[in-house]
Image (tube, helix red, strand yellow):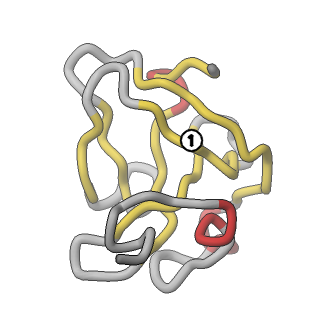
Amino acid sequence: MSELNDKKLNEELLEEVTGGVSEQSIGCRDIGPYWVRVTARSGLKCRLAPNGKVLKTYEYGHKLKINGLTTDGKWYRLLCYHPEGGTCYGFIAKEYTERI
């Protein structure tokens, strides 16, 4: 089975995006990539765009590999699985994470 089917992201997949919202419409710059941990006790919503549609919720303590930061500095960008299939960029609120 491929890594995509096993739901594991490697460096090559981190660069591959097949869906989602255009970066230009969000205002995001490349950073990292590096790992963060969810610090929100009730979980952290991953959204298609900042304050947008929820893709999934990550539990407290979950580790995520981020690769971008919105220009306002409030949201991290990460590669995630779109519920309708494929991969896309998702966004998580920076204030509910810690760098590890």
Residue 95, image x, y percentages: 51, 22
Quarter of the figure with residue 49: bottom left
User: In the rendered image, which quarter contains the C terminus?
Assistant: top right
Element type at mark 1: strand
Point out residue 9 in the picture as x, y percentages from the top left corner. Answer: 51, 60
Q: Residue at x 59, y 35 (%)?
A: 74
What residue lies at 44% left-to-right and 22% top-to-bottom? Answer: 96
Q: Residue furthest front?
A: 1
At 50% from the left and 85% from the top, the residue drawn is: 18
Locate residue 12 relative to residue 53 in the image: left or right: right
43 vs 37, left or right, is: left
Is 4 above or below relative to 29? below
Q: Amino acid at mark 1?
A: Trp
Q: Is residue 79 left or right of residue 84?
A: right
The quadrant holding residue 30 is: bottom right
* Image spot of residue 78 (x, y percent): 55, 53
Q: Residues within 10 Å of mark 1 (few under 14, many from 20)?
A: many
Residue at image coords 56%, 18% = 98
Image quarter (top left, top right, bottom left or bottom right) of the N terminus: bottom left
Q: Which residue is mark 1?
A: 75
Q: In the picture shown, does residue 55 fall above or below 46?
A: below
Taking the image as shown, residue 4 lies to the left or right of residue 5, namely: right
